[in-house]
Amino acid sequence: MSKRIEEVIVVIGPGSIGQAIARRVGTAKQILLADLRLENAEAAAVTLGNAGYTTHTSTVNVAERESVHALVEKATAIGRVVGVIHAAGVSPSQASPQTILSVDLYGTALVLEEFGNVIEAGGSGIVIASQSGHRLGALSDEQNKALALTATEDLLSLPFLQPDQVKDSLHAYQLSKRGNALRVMAEAVRWGKRGARVNTISPGIIITPLAKDELTGPRKDGYLRMIDLCPVKRAGTPDEVGNLAALLMGPDGTFITGSDFLMDGGVTASYWFGELAPK
């Protein structure tokens, strides 16, 4: 009797959104939870384990190739990697511009590259980006192509990402999230050659610990204004992101790849065409 080859879902950044997605796509699979801090991964493992899921934990620093590669090796030692959920990142109130670019931009490119080398046929990935990427002004065709296609190790050397060009954390965050969507478009071509898919979700204000940092941080007035003036007049929930991710990663989403899905309650619509428009 042959041994069953386990299917593995990797969750990088198993916070509220990562766990919400894992609950929808991780049934009867091995779930590998990875975080910069092991205690965060272990806390998520307890929550999911108590709900009947089979979990494993690991540390990972997405800004270091050796660390991401080690996570890939751990995942493939467990079984066949059929899903990757990349929900790790830092917000504008949490880090410097250079750290944001290293974690949110370079780190995402690294995860896509490394897991794109092992994702199984029929597998799928989700990268959690942000509405902020949609509020950045238009980049040039050359800049778009550079964010999408520059070799991962050269990404942070791009001239328009240097400290004299990116001087505040919000700008770094917007560039990173725009870059995430562009990178996923390019990686979808490569993942497709393995029979796998990958998409981006760009949430608006979703009530998570990270969002609460922003809602109590130096930009809180702006965040509260976005909630008050957006069409749905509320923040979102991790489960709503999980619902969309389940569609994209599941059998009903097999024609969808290389796409970015904005779900922000209409904040971006109001920013460009409504009451949130810059004066």
Image (cartoon, grey):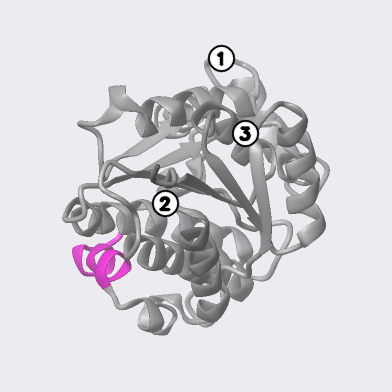
Q: Are marks 2 and 3 in contact (CB under 8 Å)?
A: no
Q: Earlier in the sequence, mark 2 or mark 3?
A: 2
Image coordinates for residue 157, horizontal then vertical, percent: 41, 85
Q: Looking at the image, can residue 53 be seen?
A: yes
**Amino acid bearing label 3:** Ile
Q: Nearer the viewer, mark 2 or mark 3?
A: 2
**Amino acid bearing label 2:** Val
- Magenta-highlighted residues: 139-149
Q: How far is disc 1 from disc 3 in space, using C-alphas?
A: 12 Å
Using a 10 Å C-alpha cutoff, classify the residue at mark 2 as few (fewer than 14 neighbours), some (14 to 19) or many (20 or more).
many
Image mark for residue 81: 2
**Magenta-highlighted stretch: main secondary structure?**
helix
User: Where is residue 216, by image quadrant?
Assistant: top right
What residue does disc 1 label? 232
Q: Residue at x 49, y 73 (%)?
A: 69
Furthest residue to the front? 1
Q: Vertically, is 277 above or below 82? A: above
Q: Vertically, is 67 above or below 29? A: below
Q: Nearer the viewer, residue 3 or 129?
A: 3
195 part of magenta stretch = no
Q: Which secondary structure lies at badge 3?
A: loop
Q: Nearer the viewer, residue 224 or 84?
A: 84
Q: Nearer the viewer, mark 2 or mark 1?
A: 2
Q: How far is disc 2 from disc 3 in space, using C-alphas?
A: 30 Å
